[in-house]
Amino acid sequence: MLPFDFGAVAGFVRRSGGQVLAVSATCTHLGCRLNLDAPARQLDCPCHRTSFAVDGAVLRHQLPATPAPLPRLVVREAGGVVEVLVPPAGA
C-alpha cells in the first residue's frame, strides 16, 4: 500500500488479486488525514480512535455513531503506470 497526495485528493493505492485499488486518505468523520499502519494493514485517524481497513471498511471507533467507510477512488493501470483519476477542480 502506497500513499499519494495530489493536493485536493489524497489516498492510498494497493494491488489486490491482480487489481489496482485506491481509497481516500481522509477520515469520513472529521476530515483528518489518515496514517498508514503498514504492519497492522490499517489506516488510523490521528484525531480520534478510528481505524479503517485497507479496503476502506471501518474496523473500530469510539464515536457515538459509526462513520461512513472510506470512499473508493477510480484507479487504473495503463502501460505499467498506475493512474488515479482525480475530478477537475470545482467538480
Image (cartoon, rainbow, N blue to C red):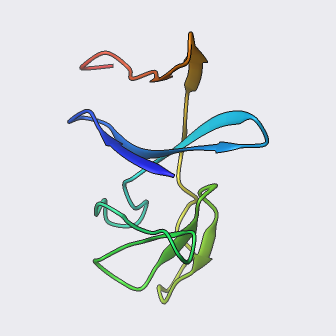
Rendered image quadrant of residue 44: bottom left
Q: Please state if 89 lies on the left or on the right of 29 as rendered.
A: left
What residue sits 79% from the left and 42% below the top? Answer: 17
Rendered-image quadrant of the C terminus:
top left
Q: Nearer the viewer, residue 53 or 80?
A: 80
Query: Above or below — where is 66 with respect to 79?
Result: below
Residue at far bottom of view? 62
Residue 74: % across, % down: 55, 27
Residue 89: % across, % down: 24, 19
Query: How many numbered markers are drawn?
Result: 0
Residue at far top of view? 79
What residue sits 61% from the left and 38% below the top? Answer: 21
What residue sits 31% from the left and 59% below the top? Answer: 31
Query: Above or below — where is 41 with respect to 40?
Result: above
Residue 24: % across, % down: 45, 47
Residue at far front of view? 80
What residue sits 36% from the left and 64% below the top? Answer: 34
Residue at far left of view? 7
Residue 6: % across, % down: 26, 33
Query: Above or below — where is 22 with respect to 77?
Result: below
Q: Please state if 30 lies on the left or on the right of 23 as rendered.
A: left
